Image (spheres, coloured by chain):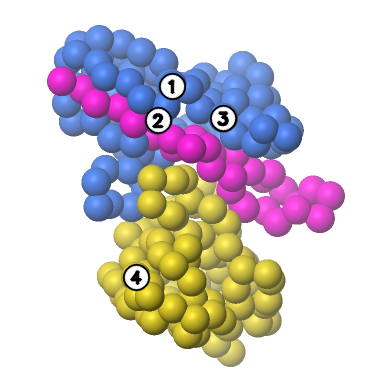
Amino acid sequence: NAGVTQTPKFQVLKTGQSMTLQCAQDMNHEYMSWYRQDPGMGLRLIHYSVGAGITDQGEVPNGYNVSRSTTEDFPLRLLSAAPSQTSVYFCASSYSKRYRGSVPDTQYFGPGTRLTVL
Amino acid sequence: DAKTTQPNSMESNEEEPVHLPCNHSTISGTDYIHWYRQLPSQGPEYVIHGLTSNVNNRMASLAIAEDRKSSTLILHRATLRDAAVYYCILAGNTPLVFGKGTRLSVIA
């Protein structure tokens, strides 16, 4: 299994541009989420999804959109980039219920996308 | 959301045991105690979890107080590769809420 993959690894945007951060997992996980991490800070939840077709807001959702059309993919869209969105973005996935001996809520994280908005 | 309290930073000598404390006085009966760590420039990774009993795995041990209001992550022999930020998280329902964690420095 590739686990959780994220693309791109690095991105530089100008203020006002839009873009989509990609996240995919091949573990058949129901639950997927997006976090951002600013320098010296912990992770803050942006949006999450408990299954295909279902999304919900986290702690800091403003300026971001998500959709979940398949179990595997959970893209994060920046509608109009702002310098305040400069951050490292992590995607994570997990089983939402105990499944084949798994631990509920054990999240697997991708390697991150480092985004700079000028 | 249930909250945890951890020291901002700790330091350890290489090859010595490390005890990372976590207070969670508002824990509910169904909350699992999870520990994650984040190595430099990487995403967080799962370390260990427990509910009521002490737990061991290949990475660490987790000691849980009898009243479940605190727990301690134990690294038996710290190595330089264990230098990371360690997060103690209460998991009842997804999503997980991360605090600032404890930054562990390991001195050679």
Q: Are marks 1 and 4 in contact (CB under 8 Å)?
A: no
Q: Are marks 4 and 3 in contact (CB under 8 Å)?
A: no
> Which residue: 25% across, 10% down?
A17
Chain holding disc 4 = B
Residue B90: say if magenta.
no
Q: Position of residue A107 (x, y in %)?
A: 58, 48
Neighbor class of circle 4 (other Cα within 10 Å; few <14, some 14-19, many 20+) is: many
The answer to whether residue B106 is left or right of residue B64 is left
Q: Position of residue B5 (x, y in %)?
A: 35, 72
Residue A92: say if magenta.
yes
Please tell me in which quadrant of the rendered image residue A12 appears.
top left
- Amino acid type at mark 1: Pro
Q: Which mark is residue A74?
A: none
As helix, strand or loop, the secondary structure at mark 1 comes to: loop
Q: Are marks 2 and 4 in contact (CB under 8 Å)?
A: no
Residue A86 lies, with reference to residue B44, above or below; the image says above
Neighbor class of circle 3 (other Cα within 10 Å; few <14, some 14-19, many 20+) is: many
As helix, strand or loop, the secondary structure at mark 3 comes to: strand
3D distance between C-alphas at marks 1 and 3: 9 Å
- For the colour yellow, the matching chain is B
Q: Earlier in the sequence, mark 2 or mark 1?
A: 1
Residue toward you, A4 or A61: A4
* Same subunit, tags 2 and 1: yes
* Residue carrying label 3: A5
Residue toward you, A34 or A58: A34
* Residue carrying label 4: B105
The answer to whether residue A56 is left or right of residue A61 is right
Q: Which mark is residue A113?
A: 2
* Residue carrying label 1: A8
* Same subunit, tags 2 and 4: no
What stretch of residues is rendered in magenta?
A: A89-118
3D distance between C-alphas at marks 1 and 4: 30 Å
